[in-house]
Image: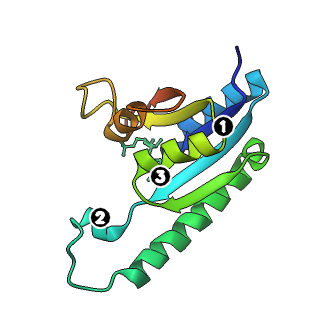
Amino acid sequence: MSYEHILVAVDLTEECDPVIKRAMNLALASNAKLSLVHIVEPMAMAFGGDVPMDLSQLQQQQFDQAKEKLNRLKNKYPEVKTGDSHLTYGQPRHEIHQLAKEHHVDLIVVGTHGRHGLALLLGSTANDVLHGAPCDVLAVRLVKTPQ
Ligand code: AMP
C-alpha cells in the first residue's frame, strides 16, 4: 500500500529541511500529494492564558512572518507547490489531527529531537502528534550537526 496524501508539519526553523526532504522522497516514490502545515500558537496560550496586555498586534506580526516563511519554503521545494499549505492558529496536535482528517491525509511527517518525553525517542510535538493520530505518523530524527 502506498501513501496518497502526505502532510509535513513544519516549525519554520532551519531544521525543517531534513523533514521536508524525507517527506518529499516518500511522496515522489508513492506519487503522493505533499502538503505543508504550520501552526501559530496563540501567545496568550504560551503565557498561560492570563496576560494583562493586548497581544493582538504582536500576534498578527507573528502570523505574517510565518506566512512569508511558509511561502519561501513552498518556492524552495517545487514538489510542495502541487499540494496545499496550511497556516492556522491553535494547538499543534489538535490542528494537525483536524487537518489530517479533513484532507484525507494518510501520513503525517514531523521532526523529532529525541530530547524530551519518551527519553531518547520522541520530541514533545512528535510525541503529542503521535497520540490519537488519525493516520500513520513518521518521526524524522533531527541530528545536530557539529559546529
Ligand atoms: P519540537 O518538539 O517543538 O522540537 O518540534 C518537533 C517537530 O514538530 C518539528 O520538526 C515539526 O515537524 C513539528 N512542529 C513543532 N512545532 C510546530 C508548529 N508550530 N507547527 C507545525 N509543526 C510543528
Residue position for label 3: 13
- Residue at 67% x, 25% y is 26
Secondary-structure class at tag 1: loop
Q: CA distance from mark 2 to mark 1?
A: 29 Å
**Quarter that holds the C terminus:** top left
* Closer to the eye: label 2 or 1: 1
Circle 1 residues within 10 Å: few <14, some 14–19, many ≥20: some
At 66% from the left edge and 60% from the top edge, which residue is drawn?
71
Q: Are marks 1 and 3 in contact (CB under 8 Å)?
A: no
- Residue at horizontal 35%, vertical 38%? 128
Question: Residue 73's x, y, as percent?
Answer: 64, 53
Pinpoint residue 64: horizontal percent, then vertical percent.
55, 73
Q: Quadrant of residue 53?
A: bottom left
N-term-proximal mark, 2 vs 1:
2
Label 3–label 2 contact, CB within 8 A: no
| Amino acid type, callout 3 | Thr
Residue marked by disc 1? 104
**Residue 139 coordinates in the image, percent (x, y):** 46, 28
Q: Quadrant location of residue 7?
A: top right
